[in-house]
Image: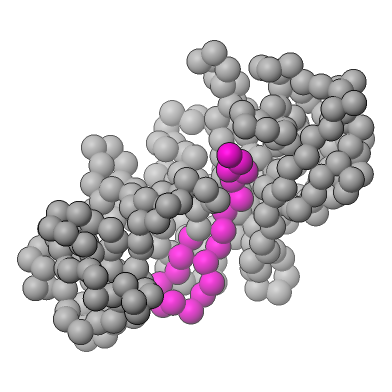
């Protein structure tokens, strides 16, 4: 009897004290270039295996999936799985797309729970969403966030693609500590510098180079336009598992900022691409903890 075994990480950021703010992403499932719909994977939430999963028999060989099969789980399995991952069937699915600045709403009890093979190992269990115009949503797997709960945590009307303008590197204020390992700081030289302005703030980002033209990181500061007070200081570094996302794109920019959550600070998003793990949303001010997006990024 073939059983599946996989380990999944679990982090629980909180939304106030009343509900958990667990964010998921959207994935497009397709086989042989045929689109099968949008899915919200739920198998990036817990540390579990067939010993801890209470309905392991659904994953046994007698129910083994074919390569391109998508199987809708019966209601009793759906109910027990959702209970296991702390989702209520009375909950709503809120999908916020930054490009459209729109929230789409679906009901959990009216949404199919499906299972399919993961390309690397194991299986994916996901909610299947059919009524989304994915073509209008841009890079939806990157620019959309999903929350499942009783109330909508998102707000619209204040999200912006960051459109950088190149400036002379002297515009980046000197003497600002780079928040990285002190042993590394002296190995970098300031490179090309870019600016972005909002009504209130000035964003400045500067490449960190080990050799001329060889960027290994970026230093970002945000300051008030009038007082020049620095309200944010962070660094984004190239590592074995992360890469710097391009600052310019022919279509949709990678970096975003704005207030998309009720009662939370302005976000910073899209500065890093991850080979392992899942992306996170940062907040201006260096005080609010980052929000990890569950994405089932198995390798």
Which residue is found at the position 58% from the left and 26% from the top? 29
Q: Main secondary structure of the magenta part?
A: loop
Instruction: Determine which quarter of the picture holds residue 6.
Output: top right
- Residue 97's x, y, as percent? 48, 45
The reply to whether residue 200 is visible in this rendering is no
Q: Is residue 284 magenta?
A: yes
Looking at this view, is 247 or 196 the one in front?
Answer: 247
Q: Is residue 138 left or right of residue 161?
A: right
Looking at this view, is 146 or 237 the one in front?
Answer: 237
Q: Is residue 59 above or below residue 280?
A: above
- Residue 9's x, y, as percent? 67, 54
The reply to whether residue 52 is visible in this rendering is yes
- Residue 265's x, y, as percent? 46, 72
Q: Is residue 231 left or right of residue 112?
A: left
Which residue is found at the position 71% from the left and 74% from the top? 17
Q: Is residue 217 left or right of residue 70?
A: left
Q: Is residue 105 magenta?
A: no
Image quadrant where one finds the N terminus: top right
Looking at this view, is 253 or 17 the one in front?
Answer: 253
Which residue is found at the position 48% from the left and 60% from the top? 281
For the image, the number of numbered tags is: 0
Instruction: Determine which quarter of the picture holds residue 219.
Output: bottom left
């Amino acid at each position: 009897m073939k059983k599946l075994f996989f380990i999944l990480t679990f982090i629980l950021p909180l939304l106030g004290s009343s509900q958990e703010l667990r964010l998921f992403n959207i994935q497009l499932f397709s086989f042989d270039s045929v689109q099968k719909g949008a899915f919200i994977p739920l198998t990036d939430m817990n540390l579990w295996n067939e010993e801890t999963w209470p309905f392991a028999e659904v994953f046994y060989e007698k129910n083994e999936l074919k390569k391109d099969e998508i199987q809708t789980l019966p209601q009793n399995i759906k109910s027990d799985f959702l209970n296991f991952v702390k989702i209520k069937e009375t909950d709503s699915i809120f999908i916020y797309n930054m490009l459209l600045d729109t929230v789409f709403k679906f009901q959990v009890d009216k949404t199919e729970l499906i299972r399919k093979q993961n390309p690397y190992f194991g299986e994916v269990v996901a909610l299947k969403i059919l009524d989304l115009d994915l073509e209008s949503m841009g890079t939806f797997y990157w620019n959309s966030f999903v929350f499942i709960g009783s109330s909508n945590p998102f707000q619209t009307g204040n999200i912006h693609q960051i459109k950088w303008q190149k400036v002379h590197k002297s515009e980046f204020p000197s003497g600002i500590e780079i928040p990285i390992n002190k042993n590394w700081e002296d190995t970098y030289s300031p490179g090309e510098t870019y600016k972005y302005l909002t009504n209130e703030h000035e964003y400045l980002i500067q490449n960190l180079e080990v050799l001329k033209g060889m960027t290994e990181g970026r230093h970002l500061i945000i300051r008030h336009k009038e007082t020049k007070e620095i309200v944010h200081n962070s660094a984004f570094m190239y590592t074995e598992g992360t890469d710097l996302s391009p600052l310019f794109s022919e279509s949709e920019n990678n970096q975003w900022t704005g207030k998309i959550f009720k009662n939370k600070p302005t976000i910073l998003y899209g500065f890093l691409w991850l080979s392992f793990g899942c992306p996170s949303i940062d907040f201006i001010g260096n005080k609010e903890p980052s929000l990890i997006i569950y994405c089932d990024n198995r390798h």
